């Protein structure tokens, strides 16, 4: 629906990057737009409340990879080579989907982490930004967004921790953190 789609980046060390992106997706859906959400590195755990709700909306397509979990959250260790392979396969799928022209907005959740960790080449994401359909609003989330992507983005928001209950031992709460 937008005449010219723009690029949004939500990055930083604090909570709220995915939530901000999902809020934007919900806003777009409420205005009759179609939305693709691709979640990297969030497989194997609980499905977030945002994803549960978005998956009930007909114009939202959600793609998650159950074999992708950040090594920090693998209790028994992760095969990083298999993780890289899954991320690269997932990125190719996401690119194919969003280049189809079927969507008004695409959210690539945690894509910045994939680049930061070296599991995905920044050049591939830069090329995607440059080659995407003109009307596609593209949202990229995750810590450590590289400068090359920030330079191309139209909106860049960095989430900064000032205070967080986890610092006092409060565990993630259903409906609030996930």
Image (tube, rainbow, N blue to C red):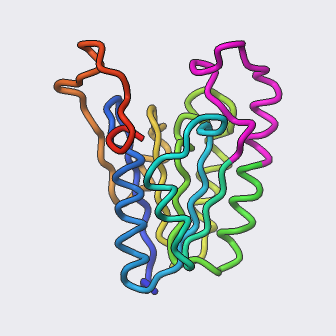
Q: What residue is rendered at 43% in x and 77% in y? A: 29
Percent coordinates x, y for residue 141 in the rendering:
46, 46
Q: What residue is rendered at 18% in x and 24% in y? A: 163
Question: Is 52 in front, or is 97?
Answer: 52
Asked whether, in this view, residue 106 is left or right of residue 5, the answer is right
Residue 82 included in the magenta stretch of the image: yes
Asked whether, in this view, residue 143 is left or right of residue 171, the answer is right
Which image quarter: residue 120?
top right
Image quarter in which the C terminus is found:
top left
Asked whether, in this view, residue 97 is left or right of residue 137, the answer is right
Q: Residue furthest left?
A: 162
Q: What residue is rendered at 71% in x and 76% in y? A: 100
Residue 13 included in the magenta stretch of the image: no
Question: Is 17 in front, or is 52?
Answer: 52
Percent coordinates x, y for residue 21 in the rendering:
40, 56
Span highlighted in magenta in the image? 65-89
Percent coordinates x, y for residue 15 in the rendering:
33, 36
């Amino acid at each position: 629906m937008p005449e010219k789609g723009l690029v949004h980046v939500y990055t930083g060390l604090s909570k709220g990057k995915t939530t901000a992106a999902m809020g934007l997706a919900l806003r777009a859906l409420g205005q009759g737009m179609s939305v693709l959400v691709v979640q990297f590195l969030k497989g194997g755990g609980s499905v977030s409340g945002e994803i549960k709700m978005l998956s009930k909306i007909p114009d939202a397509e959600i793609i998650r990879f159950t074999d992708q979990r950040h090594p920090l959250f693998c209790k028994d260790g992760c095969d990083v080579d298999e993780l890289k392979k899954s991320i690269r396969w997932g990125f190719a799928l996401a690119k194919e989907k969003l280049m189809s022209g079927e969507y008004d907005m695409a959210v690539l959740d945690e894509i910045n982490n994939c680049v930061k960790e070296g599991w995905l080449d920044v050049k591939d994401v830069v090329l995607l930004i440059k080659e995407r359909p003109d009307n596609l609003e593209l949202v990229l989330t995750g810590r450590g967004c590289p400068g090359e992507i920030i330079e191309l983005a139209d909106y860049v928001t960095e989430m900064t921790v000032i205070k967080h209950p986890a610092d006092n031992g409060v565990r993630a709460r259903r409906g609030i953190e996930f």
